[in-house]
Amino acid sequence: MKDIVIVGAGPAGLSAAIYAQRSGKSALVLEATTYGGQIINTPDIANYPGLAHVSGVEFATNLYNQAKELGAEVVFQRVTGVEDQGEIKVVKTPKAEYECRAVILATGAKNRPLGLDNEQSLIGKGISYCATCDGMFFRGKDVAVNGGGNTALEDALFLSNYCNKVTLIHRREGFRGSDESLARLKERENVEFVLNATVDHLEESEGRLSAVAVKDKNSEAVSTIPVAGLFVAIGQTPDNTAFENVASLDPQGYIAAGEDCETGTPGVFTAGDCRTKKVRQLTTAASDGAVAALAACEYIDKL
């Protein structure tokens, strides 16, 4: 019997394990693939307080080692469900069932990719899913943003402060993002709109992105836009359906929880990108992990 089982070994889950162990509780982390989550794809983290430059892999490895050194156990198994038996929770995988007193769901969310042939190989080499994470690497260069929601508009605004030119590519004429952000974006002289168009394919040179080819949805004509970077902002996909019996989900599939990281089910908490929140950043994931772990410890102490 573990005190706390944490589902997910990303920054939120590993931060939760660190805080749980330091609070005198035993923590088991279950992870389907590898530790680190999305951050391992970031070649250089430059916006984490106190760490001017560190690779995503190094950051994740340091978190993993810190949790392990404190006594947290990490098992690489995919969680298929959680059963609430009152003071006891049962976390299920295809290989085993783990009993615990509290559960922290930190399953993260995956950026929705374009699905193009060489997209994955160009991540960190011109392709990015986070403007605030990687935008500074493109200072003075031409970039493109693909998307039509608030994230895409905010990414384009952010990048327009540093980049030579920002091309916003959107598949429709209208935007789902806020009118205020759109109006501000239209005032920027270095922002160009390419509407009713989709990214057809990616061009590369010497292993890096060199241009995006866009197809007009009306004429089906394909044109090429030379860019050093493409920021994909077409949404994220959470993977929480296995936990809807113990955690309410919003229409997009995120766990409905506020800054207290409580799911509404006693003893079940959530942390990181898998929950409803406005800002999904490395710092907020780590913060959630700490909040959820301390809340779980408090819950256990009251049993």
Image (tube, rainbow, N blue to C red):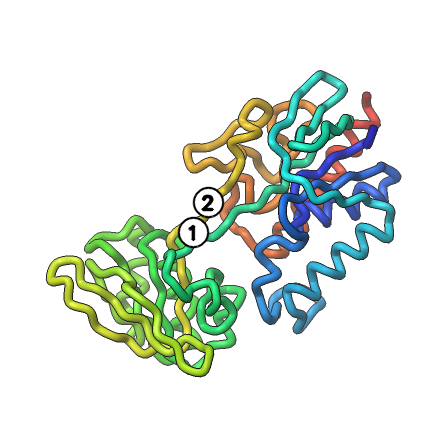
Number of marks drawn: 2
User: Of all residues shown, which one is farthest toward the left?
Assistant: 219
Mark 1 lies on residue: 112
**Amino acid type shown at disc 1:** Arg
Q: Residue 44 at what x, y percent from top left?
A: 60, 71
Are the residues tagged 1 and 2 within 8 Å (C-beta)? yes
Horizontal side of residue 300 vs 93, given as left or right: right
Give the image location of residue 9, x and y in percent.
Answer: 68, 48
Residue linked to disc 2: 237
Which of the 4 image quarters holds residue 227?
A: bottom left
- In screen coordinates, is 146 left or right of 194? right
Determine the image quadrant of residue 147.
Answer: bottom left
Q: Secondary structure at mark 1?
A: loop
- Is 282 on the left or on the right of 236, as rendered? right
Type of amino acid at the residue the image marks with label 2: Thr
Q: Residues within 10 Å of mark 1 (few under 14, many from 20)?
A: some
Question: Which of the numbered marks, if any, corresponds to residue 204?
Answer: none
| Above or below: residue 161 compared with residue 86 | below
Q: Residue 20 location, x and y as percent?
A: 80, 41
> Closer to the camera, 181 or 90?
90
Which residue shows up at 66% across the image and 73% down it? 53
Q: Residues within 10 Å of mark 2 (few under 14, many from 20)?
A: some
Residue drawn at x 67%, y 29% is 92
